[in-house]
């Protein structure tokens, strides 16, 4: 098995969030969904070629409280967007890129051993193929979609004992990834937002703003680290799987626990 990149950056942030939230009795986020978006279908299915498709669901605009504890701040998502129902699978990745770098092979398993650079290249090539703007979600979009209108530590509540119903993690994964979509989805129909593989986001890793913001996309520039969210099959305990938990890795890093899912701007 290849050497897994150690978790260094981001760990302190996650531990601090959990401690502060427990001490303050906070409950994650508040969410306020906007009115339905006219003329936008609730689901899209993209044709990747070779009989391979990708399903996305419409995420409507709204407000929510992003982060936890002292990092909690109001975010407005002002525009609707589409989010992949699952993490990008190996079959989907191969249909677009012509190769499969994954260590844990399986057509319906999430692609692993992909860097941030690989993920953005996939989105670029898929965009060219379907002539629509496919991209990585921003960190704010990711947390908003993960929470799915909840105000709790996880999309399913505050009780970590229910994690195994929604996520593949160290306690049930058998030290491998698993086919996507086998666990329960969140309230907005998204699978594996907790666990299976870490998911790259578009943002550079940086400090949160101090006040309310609209459609944040992270720092304008960064040194060498990008945001990942959601936890993976490898992770022990529940902290990594909290909706607000954030880690960061170098864009060229590849690991058996790194993957991604796609977002798409409305046509």
Image (tube, grey):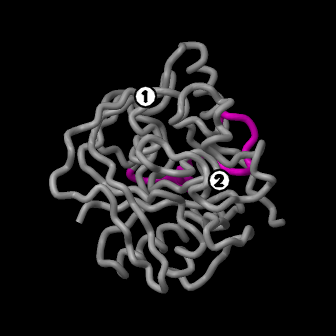
Residue shown at 48% from the left, 53% from the top: 222
* Main SS, magenta residues: loop
Q: Position of residue 244 (x, y in %)?
A: 52, 35
Residue 133's place in the image compared with 36, above or below, is below
Do callouts 2 and 1 mark residues in contact (Cβ within 8 Å)? no
Residue 257's place in the image compared with 63, above or below, is below
Residue shown at 20% from the left, 40% from the top: 35
Q: Is 222 contained in the magenta span?
A: yes
Q: Which residues, given as a range, are shown in magenta?
A: 220-239
Of residue 219 and residue 131, the one placed in the foreground of this image is 131
**Residue named by callout 2:** 196
Q: Is residue 154 visible?
A: yes
Question: Which quadrant of the rendered structure holds the N terminus?
Answer: bottom right
Distance Cα–Cα, label 2 vs label 1 = 23 Å
Q: Residues within 10 Å of mark 2 (few under 14, many from 20)?
A: many
Callout 2: helix, strand or loop?
A: loop
- 63 to the left or right of 89: left
Q: Is 233 contained in the magenta span?
A: yes
Question: Which quadrant of the rendered structure holds the C terminus?
Answer: bottom left
Instruction: Count the marks.
Output: 2
Q: Which mark is residue 29?
A: 1
Residue shown at 38% from the left, 72% from the top: 46
Residue depth check, mark 2 versus mark 1: number of the one nearer the observer:
2
Residue 63, quarter of picture: top left
Q: Is residue 244 visible?
A: no
Q: Which mark is residue 227?
A: none
Q: Position of residue 20 (x, y in %)?
A: 58, 20
Q: Position of residue 55 (x, y in %)?
A: 42, 64
Callout 1: helix, strand or loop?
A: loop
Residue shown at 24% from the left, 49% from the top: 79
């Amino acid at each position: 098995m290849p050497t897994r990149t150690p978790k260094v950056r981001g760990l302190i942030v996650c531990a601090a969030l959990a401690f502060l939230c427990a001490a303050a009795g906070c409950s994650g986020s508040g969410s306020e969904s906007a009115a339905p978006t006219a003329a936008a279908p609730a689901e899209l299915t993209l044709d990747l070629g070779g009989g391979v498709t990708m399903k996305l669901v419409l995420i409507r605009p709204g407000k929510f409280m992003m982060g936890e504890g002292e990092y909690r701040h109001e975010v407005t998502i002002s525009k609707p967007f589409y989010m992949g129902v699952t993490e990008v699978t190996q079959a989907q990745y191969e249909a677009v890129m012509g190769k499969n770098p994954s260590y844990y092979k399986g057509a319906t398993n999430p692609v692993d051993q992909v860097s941030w650079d690989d993920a953005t290249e996939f989105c670029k090539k898929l965009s060219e193929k379907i002539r629509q703007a496919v991209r990585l979600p921003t960190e704010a979009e990711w947390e908003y979609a993960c929470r799915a209108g909840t105000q709790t530590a996880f999309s399913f509540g505050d009780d970590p004992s229910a994690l195994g119903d929604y996520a593949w993690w160290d306690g049930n994964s058998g030290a491998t990834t698993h086919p996507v979509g086998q666990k329960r989805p969140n309230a907005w129909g998204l699978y594996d937002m907790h666990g299976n593989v870490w998911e790259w986001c578009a943002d550079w890793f940086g400090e949160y703003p101090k006040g309310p913001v609209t459609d944040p996309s992270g720092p304008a520039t960064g040194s060498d680290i990008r945001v990942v969210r959601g936890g993976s099959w490898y992770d022990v305990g529940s902290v990594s799987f909290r909706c607000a938990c954030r880690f960061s890795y170098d864009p060229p890093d590849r690991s058996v626990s790194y993957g991604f899912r796609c977002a798409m701007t409305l046509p």
